[in-house]
């Protein structure tokens, strides 16, 4: 058995990972490398939209050259695009005439890795407002923009692009539902084996409270934990759901989230 490095910044800390099953390994690995014990408790799962016809039609249009830009707001979007393109027997290369914009490096990397397409613009600010600020100056007048996104996505980006005089097809490509499985979190909370919880979206916040309640746990016990959020929008969602927020990542990345969490405890050691 490997003995944890007691000098590691998160040595021995039990940290809840609320991401979906397919997302959690990356954050869990970063936490483990910092000495923490990742506690996987998926609070979200990603499903294709119940009706894929609008997205399928848009992808056919994109392959036919009827869009100028494809805007990707999450790695989840890319996975859904990959699945639908395969189902439709459209090779990703048929979208090569599109310029592609992505929110943050994780989304851009997903485009390159899963679609093998180049990314024209990667927004340095990983929120919709930041992407809008960087995208609008490079759009040609009357650009045609395809924006596949979550069904609960904020309308900030599409509104900004449309107000600037461009054509936007905003399509609900996937939905976020409550996850299941993972550790017995109510028991671990009662046993005092949890030190922190990480949130990477507003959905993970809301669904954690729901899962705990459904499992007979006490959501109020979350107030005894260090709450770490990947960005200001997620942090506000946590506050809106009655949680105090101790840690907000400096940049919208998993690495920054773990660094901020480690810095929190280092400052108190």
Image: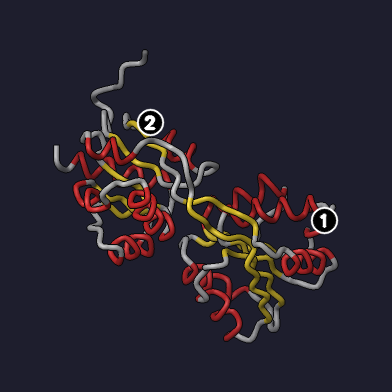
The residue that appears at 66% across and 62% down in the rendered structure is: 50
Identify the image quadrant of the C terminus: top left
**Vertical position of residue 142 compared to residue 3: above or below:** below
Residue 72 point in image, percent of width and height: 61, 61
Residue 114 point in image, percent of width and height: 68, 46
N-terminal label among 1 and 2: 2
Direction from residue 1 to residue 84 in the image, left or right:
right
Q: Nearer the viewer, residue 215 or 140?
A: 215
The residue that appears at 36% across and 15% down in the rendered structure is: 2
Q: Which mark is residue 88?
A: 1
- Regarding mark 1 in the picture, which secondary structure is present there? helix
Q: Is residue 190 visible?
A: yes
**Callout 2: 10 Å neighbours few (<14), some, many (20+)?**
some
Q: Nearer the viewer, residue 260 or 156?
A: 156
- Residue highlighted by disc 2: 32
Q: Is residue 249 visible?
A: no
Residue 219 point in image, percent of width and height: 27, 52
The residue that appears at 64% across and 62% down in the rendered structure is: 49
- Regarding mark 2 in the picture, which secondary structure is present there? helix
């Amino acid at each position: 058995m490997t003995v944890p490095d007691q000098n590691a910044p998160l040595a021995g800390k039990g940290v809840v990972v609320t991401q979906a099953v397919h997302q959690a390994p990356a954050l869990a690995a970063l936490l483990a490398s910092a000495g923490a014990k990742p506690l996987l408790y998926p609070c979200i799962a990603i499903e294709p939209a119940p009706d894929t016809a609008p997205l399928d039609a848009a992808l056919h249009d994109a392959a036919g050259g009827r869009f100028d830009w494809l805007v990707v707001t999450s790695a989840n979007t890319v996975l859904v695009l990959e699945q639908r393109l395969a189902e439709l027997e459209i090779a990703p290369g048929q979208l090569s005439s599109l310029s592609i914009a992505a929110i943050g490096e994780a989304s851009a990397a997903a485009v390159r890795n899963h679609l093998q397409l180049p990314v024209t613009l990667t927004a340095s600010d990983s929120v919709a407002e930041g992407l809008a600020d960087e995208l609008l100056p490079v759009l040609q007048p009357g650009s045609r923009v395809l924006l596949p996104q979550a069904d609960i996505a904020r309308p900030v980006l599409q509104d900004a692009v449309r107000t600037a005089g461009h054509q936007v097809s905003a399509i609900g490509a996937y939905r976020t539902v409550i996850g299941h499985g993972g550790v017995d979190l109510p028991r671990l909370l009662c046993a005092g084996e949890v030190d922190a919880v990480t949130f990477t979206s507003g959905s993970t916040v809301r669904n954690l409270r729901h899962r705990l309640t459904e499992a007979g746990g006490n959501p109020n016990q979350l107030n005894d934990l260090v709450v770490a959020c990947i960005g200001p929008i997620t942090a506000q969602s946590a506050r809106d759901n009655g949680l105090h927020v101790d840690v907000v990542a400096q940049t919208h990345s998993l690495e920054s989230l773990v660094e901020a969490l480690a810095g929190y405890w280092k400052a108190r050691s």
